[in-house]
Amino acid sequence: MLCSFCLSDVRFKKEKTSGNLASIYLCPTCNEQAPALYSQDYRKYPPVVISAVGFRQHGKTVYFASLFYTLKKLTLARDWPEFFTMGLNEDSLDTVYGNARMLDAGALPDSTPKNFPRPTMIRAEGIPMQPDCTLLFFDTGGECFEKPTQLVQFAGFVRRAKAALLLISIPDLEDPRAGMQKLLNTYVVGMGELGAKTKDQHLIVVYTKADQLVSRLTGRWKSLYTYLVQGSVDDLAQHNGYIERMEDVSDQLYDFTEEELQAHEFLNAAEANFKSVNFSIISALGTEPQGAKLSVRIVPRRILDPILWIMEKSFSGPERLLRRWWAW
């Protein structure tokens, strides 16, 4: 089993301790107590590591907060009859519901501190055409991705992700070509220092704060603007063909990166170092905030696309179908 804290492959120790009615599960490597539901249902809900990689102020923490808001405040379960999510320990419950309440009140989460984070563990069941699984969300300070040594010290969780999630805010880069390549270069070097290979991973590039990109999404790129602004949760109700639409948008964003951003070196390096490269475009809030407050009510746009990409890349097609069949 994969320990959700130290990310080592272990066999949990089942122990009976004084003061506990039931046995607890301890990791023999880090001695952390694993959630009982995570350990007991590991085969039915295998872990999927979701690691946010990106510079400071590029929207990593706000993206996760908006995702948790979407899971708990919007109407996914109405349109996906089998769908629900559950936090697997007290910390995860506090994070999910706390972030949802915060955004509902018009406030934004604080920047993530630079440390090795504890994961937010969420059981996801009934996502159309995807296997049931446990999503392990990891987030750390953006300064950890400025240098490979910082990545190794504070973001070692990246080595266990089957799909790397690269979050990039183009409006916050002075020179997108140089900034994107620096982030990718730092990640590849850091992975090597961790003894991992990016060739074993898929790369998901996510353009964040897309509401600030609308001036560039004109002419040839107008269809990207249309896709973004129509990206309400209701659009996911018709899930047949949704992944195909994501693939089409990914191709358009590749062309946008090549032709509009002129980020040729980034694209060449990405294709040379990863199994595959795909793109998403999101707006976690729907509009630019005023400092630490939302100026209008949150309206997430295409917020689930990166997670669907990660699930697509973390399980093979036959494995997705098998696990869905097994869950039934």
Image (cartoon, rainbow, N blue to C red):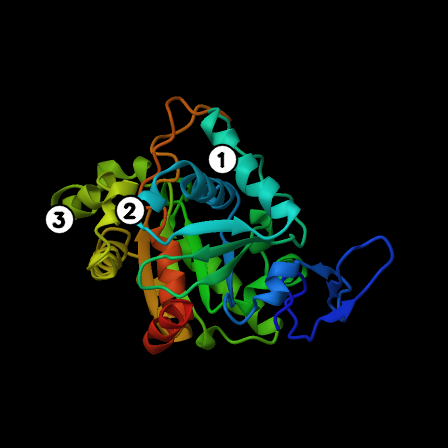
Q: Quadrant of residue 73?
A: top left
Q: Nearer the viewer, residue 240 or 266?
A: 240
Of marks 3 and 1, which one's residue comes earlier in the chain?
1
Q: In the rendered structure, which amino acid carries the disc numbered 2?
A: Asp
Q: In the rendered structure, which amino acid carries the disc numbered 1?
A: Ala
C-alpha distance separating marks 3 and 2: 33 Å
C-alpha distance separating marks 2 and 1: 20 Å
Q: Nearer the viewer, mark 3 or mark 2?
A: 2
Question: From this viewpoint, which residue is outermost toward the left?
Answer: 219
Q: Is residue 125 above or below residue 325?
A: above
Q: Quadrant of residue 297?
A: top left
Residue ID at (54%, 42%): 96
Q: Quadrant of the C terminus?
A: bottom left
Q: Is residue 211 left or right of residue 307?
A: left
Other residues around mark 2 within 10 Å, as few (<14) / some (14–19) / many (≥20): some
C-alpha distance separating marks 3 and 1: 36 Å
Other residues around mark 1 within 10 Å, as few (<14) / some (14–19) / many (≥20): many
Identify the residue under disc 1. Answer: 100
Q: Nearer the viewer, mark 2 or mark 1?
A: 2
